[in-house]
Amino acid sequence: MTATLTTSPTKLPPSTHEFAEVIHRLEAGGSMLPDTPENLMQIIGIYKAYAVPMDFYWRDLLYIAERVFLNPLPAFKYFLPQAYMDLPNHYAGDTADLRIWRGQATAHPELVEFMKKGETNSPMPKLLHHLWHDRINMEFAEACMRAMLWHQEMYTPVNRFYDYLETDEYVANADRAIRAYFKGNPLMLGLYKVFPDMFVEQVRQLSYYSNLGLFWEVMAPVFFEMSDLYDEGKMTTVPEAMDFLVNGIFAIAGRPIYHHAHINGECYEIIPKSKGFTWLYEAALPYVESVFYRTAPFRGTKSYNAQAGQVPANQADFHYGILYADVFPVGTAGIPPTLLMQDMLHFLPPYLVDYYKQYCRGEEDMLIQLGVTFQRSMYNVTSAVIQALRTALLYPLDDPNPGHLKANREFFESQLNRFKRPEARLRDIQSQDYR
Amino acid sequence: MPDIVDIAVSNDSFTTLVTAVKAANLVDTLKSPGPFTVFAPTDEAFAKLPPGTVQTLVQNIPQLSRILTYHVAAGKYTQAELEQLGEVASVEGSVIPIRSFDGSFEVKNASVVAADIEADNGIIHVLDTVILMG
Amino acid sequence: MLSLLIWVPVAGAIAVGFAPVPPRLLKLTSLIISGIVLLLTLWLVGQFDASDPAFQLQEYFAWLPSLGLNYDLAIDGLSLPMVVLNSFLTWIAIYSSNEKTERARLLYALMLLVGGGVAGAFLAHNLLLFFLFYEVELIPFYLLISIWGGENRGYAATKFLLYTALSGALIVAAFLGLIWFTDASSFTYESLAGQSLSLSLQLVLLVTLLIGFGIKVPLFPLHTWLPDTYVAASTPVAILLGGVLAKLGTYGLLRFGLGLFPDAWMFLAPGLATWGTISVLYGAIVAIAQKDIKRMVAYSSIGHMGYILLGAASLTALSVVGSVAQMVAHGLILATLFHLVGIVETKVGTRELDVLNGLMNPIRGLPLVSALLVLGGMASAGIPGLVGFIAEFMVFQGSYSIFPWQTLFCVVGSGLTAVYFVILLNRTCFGKLDNAIAYFPKVEWRERVPALMLVISIVFLGIQPTWLVRWSEATTTQMVAAMPDTSQPLALQTFTQEIFAPRISLGMQPEPLPRS
């Protein structure tokens, strides 16, 4: 980093914040991630590797929310029917509402290829592929969904999703769907009579399946398009990549979030589109907060003693998300990030594979190297969210009013205060040596 | 005296707003006795939004209504009253903060271009920026 | 035949040292030579008659008859396991050496020379010949430590040299005394040779011998050279030092202390058992306090050598064969631990307990090395199913009826071993890998081979202990039976029949053998 970056780009005096350098970069329209060609190559490559499994995640999440629904033994919920593989994405292809990716609306070709034969490239039956974990690890998507469910109170009252799930209207909608789903099944209907709340709570969880599915339906084409632009030489800096995300966030902000269940050929609107729930307020912002920042400690890597105060009493103090995560235990069994890294490993662009081969243990620790890259890329996404919020709620970066600029700075500083925690990786990603 | 909708329709700088209000079927509401306080973004304000934003909203009327109702408060508040209150609840439900820097009248992150335009069923303050919840 | 075990490596050392072997082939050549020796050793095992307690395969050439010094080699159940251990660990040590080191030619020549010399000491059937081979190790080891060692190598090497020279002086004094006082015509080893002397004279000679070999083992408080030397020595040298050379001390105690001065040995036995126990407890407790893992392993070595003395002092058939088993077990386990600690140091760059952490990490850590380290620690702590348990259990079981208190304290020492290994493993292998330092180079398969071979032998001998004890039981049983008065074997026999009868026949006689 050069000395020029440490001086404030605005008319304000230089920030005295611990991350003053980063704040000045944000004020200049940059990202928390330093703008280097190496960083750009890494994050674009990983966006692409992330988007392919994400193309499966959103389809399967919607499949589970809409079709599998309350199946008490959902053993085949990850076996996505062709109809959902072909489900047209609303933001890609010729049929798009708003075309973000110039590619196709149905599942990505690399995903289709992978679904056929998997990593093992063997013609064994689908069930064996599944049991061998030679597949897309939907468990990761479900872990994200559960993080959103568990942290569902955040951003209320702007986020109306949680409040709505507790209304009588929602319970009545869920009730209709439950009765229709278990029609002719006296056992489950009997159980429903005895434990109605349990069933409704399960439907609430399914509403989050739908919520996350609709959120990722947008993100997959955004990342595909960024990858294509980079390959065409039309995306050349990290701030450009961030701005593309900011524009994407605004363009799709009003996309409805809903939950429809399709039971016996009939559509039950558990959360109708007419509730006015939007992609930005009910999905994107809660997602970023719950998955990037908060989540929950993983089982398997470290023992936490809640009685000794090792786990915060207040959910808002949870900081176990990707922006804070120790990526090095990736590879340990049973932790959700391992599943995601494994999924991304299958779809890395060749330039990223070559890059990883040059560092650390080369191919042997690629899972961790790409995890660190993923962390970098998510700092860029978070930067986009911060800049988007600044655009929506505050003032332009070139605002002539110093009072406005001051408000912007306070906003940036308050956002970066969250990375003062010792486990935050903002310091690490400033250097290329963290890999 | 003309009502809120009449004033907006008659003014050239509110064509986008009027289109949006019509699309969201809010005309009848805004013609009702009210009274309402409307924070009306100009055409330039809508133009400042990144591309695609308006398109997506127009495709999804309930979501469009939600954004529009954030620009409306129940009751009739003049600039002086608003500045004294410091914030006001919108019809959407979220709160609209009233800020002022160096004596200027600002509604959230929007500057008020023209304040206290009296209508039959309320009052209009003209904004240079579309305000968003959060 | 026996000569080959000595002269093949010595000839190899000369070849490596002086023949124009290209530098890149030095290690390979040395490996082939020591591999041949290992194969010869295994062939020797095939020739060995385990049921015969006496010396076998004797080779004799008159050398300096006037001095009583003859080239006289023989092998029995006591020396055979030591010879095998020596050949195996020499190969392992050469394998785990770094050929890119400076003066590689000298390094390999010295290692081969040491291998041949140690074999000579174990095979010598003549006291003076033993002493010569024993002393021949001195300079090569001094060089091995002072040239290729780590920090403080000069100091450590000198300390080692002084201690070992003193040890040698004491041993030769005892040997000479024995010959002079018994008026023997030569230095040829004769079991019970000292019995004709008065007890007080025997005691003087035995104590001299005990101190001499006690330095070599080492036993507390003669151990102070050991931590410095083991820590300063490079991995292959540490393997040789701890795995093989220390065994010269315990072998000497059994062969010459117990074998030559049975009356005095019997007389001193309670003191010896207590001495061993103190060494066990001292080694374990000091190891707990260490912050350097190599030093911790070094102190663990002091503790584990104590069991051998306890077993030898108890003089039951089971405890003495247990002592021999413990020598082998300790050699294998210590070599494993030193090798793994060496890998950790090479890759991580530190041996500090406070810095090391999370090496079990599956991708960025050293998972297999950590797993083997856990296994080595378990073997050292005497977890059943591993060779350490077999040896310690035989010693304890054999000693309890003779020295119950000492045995109980040794059992406590065994428990303390688990304490420091839990500390070591918990800090080193488990926990969170420190992101700031965790960019270690990966461990190549070839680097894992020695540890894997050692661990396989540890596990194999742990579940099939017959292969460990069958070679020495005839000899040790006879040694015990030949003692002046052993009233214990009957109780032992019942035990051994119960425990080992299906697999091991200890070859016990129903009655103690008549005194010779």
Image: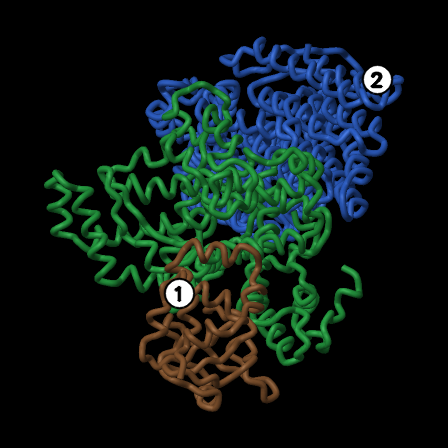
Chain colours: A green, B brown, C blue
User: Under tag 1, what secondary structure?
Assistant: helix
User: Under tag 2, what secondary structure?
Assistant: helix
Location of residue C54 with respect to A434 vertically, above or below: above
Amino acid beneath label 2: Ala
Location of residue C341 with respect to C176 vertically, above or below: below
Location of residue A94 with respect to C285 vertically, above or below: above
Residue A125 horizontal/vertical position (percent): 39, 21
Amino acid beneath label 1: Arg
Residue C258 horizontal/vertical position (percent): 57, 31
Instruction: Give the chain letter at badge 1.
Output: B
Residue C454 horizontal/vertical position (percent): 58, 28
Task: Say if residue C380 shows up in the picture.
Answer: no
Q: Mark 2 points at which residue?
A: C15
Instruction: Give the chain letter at badge 2.
Output: C
Q: Which of C473 and A386 is in front in this view?
A: A386
Q: Name the residue under label 1.
A: B66
Query: Residue shown at 65%/55% (left/top)?
Result: A429
